Structure formats: C-alpha cells, structure tokens
Amino acid sequence: MEDNRGYQINFSSMLSDAMYDRDRREKKARTMLVIIRDFIGSDLRRFKLLDVGCSTGFIGNYLADYFGQVIGIDIDELAINFAQANCKKKNLNFLKADSMSMKFSENIFDIAICAHIYEHVPDAERLMAEIYRVLKPRGVCYFAAGNRLNVKEPHYNLPFLSILPRSLAHVYIRTSGKNKFYYEKHLSYWGLKRLVQKFERIDYTQKIIESPEEFHAEYLISPDTKKGKLARLIVKYAYWLSPTYIWLLRKPQQSMPEMKCP
C-alpha cells in the first residue's frame, strides 16, 4: 500500500467543495500571477503555461487572461470534463493526461504550475523530472508544497497524521472514518529540497508571510492575527517547520536563449 499507491483517480470527488469553489481557486490563481509577475515582469502574453494537476480548471481559466497559451492536465476525468465544459477560451485547453509521463516534447513550456500536487502522485521524483523536461531552459515552475511536519494534516484535518509512520497513519485515518488508507505522501523541508535539487530555487515563502497584501494572499494568512505573527516567527527562526512552502523553480540555462527577468 505504501510502495504501490497507484493513481489517485477521482480527487475532485473526494474534495468536491474545495475543487469546485471557484472564488477560492481564483484567489490562489491571483497569488500565482502576482508572484510570477514579480519575478519575470508584467509581459506574460508571450509565454506558454502548463497547469499540472489542473483539476476543475478554474486556475487555468483565470491565468489564460494573462498568458499567451495555457494547457491544463489531470488524470481526474470528471474534473477534466468539468473544466472543458465550463472554462472555454481560445488560448486554453484541458487534457486528461499523466503528469508523470507527459506526451509533450522537451523544452516547450515557459511556465509550469505545480501547486500541492507532489503528495498526490505515485512518484514525486518522476513528476518533477517531467516538469523539468518540458520546461524551456530558464523556464520557471511555481511550486507550492505542504510540509510533512505539519501539526494538522490539511486534506483530512487530522492532527499529526502526516507525521506518523505510514502503517500508523493508515490505521489512524481508517479509525477516523475519513478514508480506507492514507494516500498522500508528504515530504519534510529537507525532502522537498532534494526533490527539486535540479532546479534553481527562489523562495517566496517568507515574503508572502511578511507581506500577504502585496501578493494578494490575505485568504491564506492575516498578518495582524496570532496565527500570522506565529507564522512570521516560524519562517524566521524555524523555517523547517513552516506548514507550506512557495518556491519558484528555475530550470538552468542550456543552449536556448535566456528568459528575460528583471
């Protein structure tokens, strides 16, 4: 069960409220847009974007207003069907596809989105290798990732679930009645660093926590609350305990022209 997890086929059905919440998905997309613009600049129309694990398509639909072309992929057939029916723009396409074995050629995307996806695939290393392969040299991946060392597991809202050994986590989640076994496989800060080691890593986590208004991330954290103050202390003094990381991952330069960045 731990080593052969298989594919998590119908994730949108498991978390229907979250995946079909257009307002919240578009807030996430706006934060992605602001961060990418902060790093690359405002002229995004010349860029081709891949949304990995696009689910119901709301994020890709939002970003299509700013990028030249957007392609969303997911193995969740119900979610893809919903996206194709409800998110229609000339420069936007959704495909049922395996993110660990993409049918795209090498070096064709300028930007990739991989937001809280790594823990849902059978092999996170293959996922990141594929993103690396399809990105152009100097291409950028927006990477949002949960930390295994999280007091409350975000998918099931169970304390310490992701920290437990897998065998105990399966028993815990089954006893709670929330699932038959614990599918998600989170990594610690150090595990995430190893996962993305082929990329240049540009960290936006602390910037967002210190200035959520600047990145339109107030829906994630409010700086004036106890939670916001605690988050600032954690990223400053115990970064390895941050519940979530937001990084831009840049593929190193090879033989193609450099992506223009400020």
Image: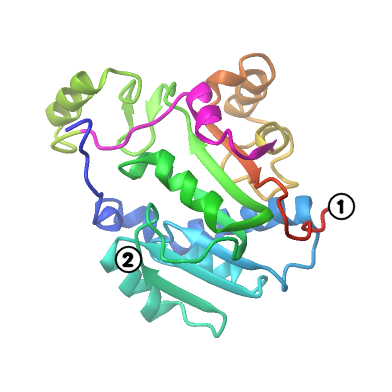
Residue 84 locus on image (x, y percent): 38, 78
Coloring basis for residues: rainbow
Residue 43 occupies which quadrant of the picture?
bottom right
User: 154 above or below 61?
Assistant: above
Residue at mark 1? 262
* Magenta-colored stretch includes residue 175: no
Direction from residue 25 to residue 79 in the image, left or right: left
Relative to the observer, which residue lies in front, 22 or 55?
55
The residue drawn where x is 62% and y is 40% is: 199
- Secondary structure beneath dot 2 equals helix
- Secondary structure beneath dot 1 equals loop
The total number of labels drawn is 2
The residue drawn where x is 43% and y is 24% is: 150
Residue at mark 2? 79
Tell me which numbered mark, 1 or 2, is placed earlier along the sequence. Answer: 2
Q: What residue type is labelled 1?
A: Pro
Furthest-top residue in view? 237
Are the residues at dot 1 and dot 2 in contact (C-beta closer than 8 Å)? no
The residue drawn where x is 39% and y is 71% is: 95
Label drawn at residue 138 = none
The stretch in magenta equals 182-203
Residue 177 locus on image (x, y percent): 14, 34
Residue 261 locus on image (x, y percent): 82, 54
- CA gap between label 1 and label 2 equals 37 Å
Q: Which amino acid does label 2 sit on?
A: Ala
